[in-house]
Image (cartoon, rainbow, N blue to C red):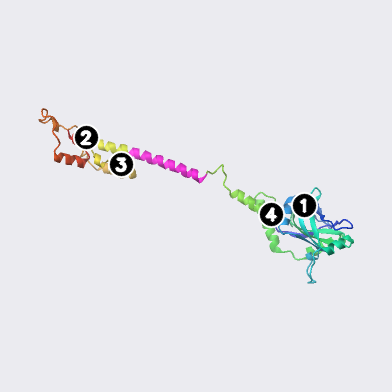
Amino acid sequence: MTGRTAICEAVELPARTAPDWVHLLPVGAVNGRDGRRWLLDDPAQLIARSAKGGDLPIDYDHESEKPKSHGGPLPAAGWIKSLQTRTDGIWGKVEWTGRAAEMIANREYRFLSPVLHYHPTTGQVLRLIGAGLVHRPNLALTALSEQEMTMPDPLEDAATADLSRIATALGLNETADADTILTAINAQTAPDPARYVPIEAVADLLKQRNSAASDNAARAADAKVQQAMNSGYLTPAMRDWAVALCTQDEARFDSFIATSTPAYAHLRRPSRLHDVGHEAQGRRPASADERAICEQLGLTPTDLK
């Protein structure tokens, strides 16, 4: 998240040596010499944000934070290589330049003043930018005043305000950074396992339902065709066609039966052909014509007897 820059009260360095570790910020309230206050309530998150920029520079008298009017080089006094949370705040491991180490050992510089990036509305400390070797703590106030007199970036402030509104709408703290906001958005768009089931399970359920429906339709069609056959509307040879029609378009099948006559009803009644003069002779074999008729109708010669 974007914000504004501030230079804080300086911390005095140990005498006679350039320390490997320096105390940069306290936890909780961070007080400026001009009476302004900031808040550091999540040191771990601050360290994570600050580490994204690589090594943090330490300059002389906050020259890199002042308007660049001289146009000359701005040598570094050292580099903060890593940050660590302790009970009294945030500490940084420093790799000093030879010149800076000698000046600290000679007491030419005694104080270290951190530079912060903070939320313009809440004062929440967002990121550690670096630090500066200074002579007196109140010089940090002068640098801070110079920083505030520079024209603020309206786009940066607008972006910060927009992120704050988005964070509030998501139920987050208004100082939440972009990563936290994105995580909250992704969490809201993720499906709720209690409300959704895997698509494979749905597909399997639909397959089972369709199979059951198909079986039921086939059984119903078969029963209706059998009834039509028993009533003489269909012959056994017409069975497969009739079942397929009834399954696919039951209304069309019903219309066919309704407009037909039971022309084959006599095939379902016992035939008396074998009673006419053949009692003594036994059963007469079917003639060629009778067999042909039976074949066309899907019957056997015994169905005619």
Q: Residue 78 lies in what quarter of the image?
A: bottom right
- For the record, the magenta segment spans 198-221
Q: How many C-alpha atoms fall within 10 Å of the one at disc 1: few (<14), some, or many (≥20)? A: some
Which one is closest to the eye, mark 1 or mark 2? 1
Residue depicted at 48% across the width and 44% down the height: 202
Residue 225 image position (x, y, % from top left)? 29, 39
Residue 212 is one of the magenta-drawn residues: yes
Q: Which residue in the structure is indicated by mark 4?
A: 177
Q: Which residue in the structure is indicated by mark 2?
A: 268
Task: Specify the amino acid type for callout 1.
Answer: Gln
Task: Specify the amino acid type for callout 2.
Answer: Arg
Which one is closest to the eye, mark 1 or mark 3? 1
Q: CA distance from mark 1 to mark 2?
A: 99 Å
Q: CA distance from mark 1 to mark 3?
A: 81 Å
Q: Residue 81 lies in what quarter of the image?
A: bottom right
Q: How many C-alpha atoms fall within 10 Å of the one at disc 4: few (<14), some, or many (≥20)? A: some
Q: CA distance from mark 3 to mark 4?
A: 68 Å
- Say the numbered circle drawn on residue 243: 3
Residue depicted at 25% across the width and 42% down the height: 238
